[in-house]
Image (cartoon, grey):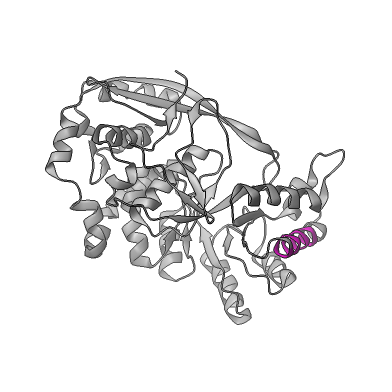
């Protein structure tokens, strides 16, 4: 399996070809900013890079999925802040560990911002990937533009927004499981919050229940949510917890309930996805097939897209990097595949995705990770009619409240 570093190298190797092959779309990437905008970045020299963290709290305990135990009440997110000699500051999540990032700080300090970041492309060297998000934020601050505007849109595309927090909460707490009513209560909370899409974790029979009982519970919960929230889309995520035949049994079990998408029901192979697609075609199931989050293999994902066996690309927004997502998008357009970068764990990743989608479009929905924070002002983002509206403030439009 190709790791994410090799994925990035493969992506960069093919980026020029994909940009040339879609000239109508390529203008967003190659012909974008004026010389004046890049000159404005050249006035700023990077003076300091500092590190810290912010706390994000979930509104409830997030439970198990097919493979992992409890996900907890929130996370502590490592961040970096980049300051220029003119006093401009940009900050964002730190990609990867602090140790690796610290080793390349000396390669940033003293450089002009224009040398490490180009508005039309993003970062100028993969070595700067730990600071990819922060450099996008900083460029937006310097130019007084939201990141989506740096990507070519004065008014952002707006995108559907799903709750990614419907886990196996029926199994918690272990001494007195809440059952289906607990899952429905969580959906009600998310509905009242503004979501009109729910992504249900399924695959209880992979680890936490017998295969028979887990499948029955997956089916029962899907039916209960569909009945309770008829105006909402349902997405399902198996976290590779099924075989292809077990998952077809799940689809048979839910009957005519429409699924907006099916995510990673089993570890992706051409043969298994062809079996699933063939069954879906015969059964007139029109759900989107979404993959590419877990250990992405670019060659296999390309093959799945070429064969029309994959409809949505899910690689993580930070794992691949914002710049590399900008490079990948025209390739997806060429394949007629939509994006929805994985964002689980951090609402910051959700909001970065909102700017990627806002500037480039071609995003079918965005993963929501409902959170509050005493460390970050998150108020610039809002939900309207089930869509996520990105902040129109400079950069990603989030201010640090501490440090």
Residue 218 horizontal side relative to residue 137, left or right:
right
Q: Is residue 73 above or below residue 296?
A: above
Q: Is residue 252 magenta?
A: no
Q: Is residue 361 visible?
A: yes
- Residue 206 in percent (x, y) is at 72, 53
Q: Where, by quadrant of the figure, is residue 363 drawn?
A: bottom left
- Residue 311 in percent (x, y) is at 47, 65
Looking at the image, which residue is at 46% across and 65% down?
A: 304
Q: Is residue 221 magenta?
A: yes
Q: Is residue 148 above or below residue 137?
A: below
The magenta-colored residue range is 215-227
Residue 329 horizontal side relative to residue 109, left or right:
right
- Residue 95 in percent (x, y) is at 43, 34
Looking at the image, which residue is at 45% across and 53% down?
A: 297
Front one among 358 and 321: 358
Front one among 312 and 136: 136
How many circles with numbers are drawn on the protein?
A: 0
Residue placed furthest toward the right: 176
Looking at the image, which residue is at 73% across and 61% down?
A: 228
Front one among 272 and 229: 229
Q: Where, by quadrant of the figure, is residue 145 drawn?
A: top left
Looking at the image, which residue is at 68% across and 74% down?
A: 256
Q: Is residue 208 visible?
A: no
């Amino acid at each position: 399996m190709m790791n994410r570093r090799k994925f990035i190298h493969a992506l960069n190797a093919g980026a020029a070809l994909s940009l040339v092959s879609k000239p109508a779309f390529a203008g967003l990437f190659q012909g974008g900013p004026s010389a004046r905008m890049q000159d404005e970045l050249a006035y700023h020299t990077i003076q300091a890079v500092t590190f810290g963290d912010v706390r994000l709290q979930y509104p409830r305990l997030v439970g198990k999925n097919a493979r992992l135990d409890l996900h907890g009440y929130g996370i502590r997110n490592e961040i970096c802040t980049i300051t220029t000699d003119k006093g401009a500051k940009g900050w964002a999540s730190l990609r990867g560990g602090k140790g690796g990032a610290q080793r390349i700080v000396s390669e940033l300090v003293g450089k002009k911002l224009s040398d490490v970041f180009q508005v039309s492309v993003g970062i100028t060297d993969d070595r700067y990937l730990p600071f990819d998000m922060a450099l996008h934020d900083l460029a937006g601050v310097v130019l007084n533009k939201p990141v989506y505007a740096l990507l070519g849109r004065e008014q952002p595309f707006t995108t559907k927004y799903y709750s990614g927090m419907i886990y196996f909460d029926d199994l918690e707490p272990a001494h007195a499981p809440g059952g289906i009513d607990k899952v429905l209560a969580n959906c009600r909370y998310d509905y009242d919050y503004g979501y009109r899409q729910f992504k249900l974790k399924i695959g209880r029979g992979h680890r936490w229940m017998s295969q028979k009982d887990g499948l029955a519970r997956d089916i029962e919960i899907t039916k209960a949510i569909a009945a309770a929230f008829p105006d909402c889309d349902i997405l399902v995520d198996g976290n590779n917890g099924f075989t292809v035949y077990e998952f077809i049994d799940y689809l048979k079990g839910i009957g005519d309930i429409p699924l907006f998408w099916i995510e990673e029901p089993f570890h992706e192979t051409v043969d298994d996805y062809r079996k699933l697609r063939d069954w879906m075609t015969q059964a007139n199931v029109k759900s989107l097939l979404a993959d590419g989050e877990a250990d992405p293999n670019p060659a296999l994902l390309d093959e799945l897209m070429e064969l029309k066996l994959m409809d949505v690309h899910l690689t993580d927004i930070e794992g691949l990097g914002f710049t590399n997502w900008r490079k990948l998008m025209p390739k997806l357009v060429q394949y007629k595949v939509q994006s929805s970068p994985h964002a689980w764990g951090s609402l910051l990743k959700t909001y970065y995705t909102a700017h990627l989608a806002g500037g480039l479009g071609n995003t079918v929905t965005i993963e929501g990770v409902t959170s509050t924070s005493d460390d970050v002002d998150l108020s610039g983002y809002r939900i309207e009619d089930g869509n996520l509206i990105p902040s129109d403030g400079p950069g990603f439009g989030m201010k640090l409240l501490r440090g």
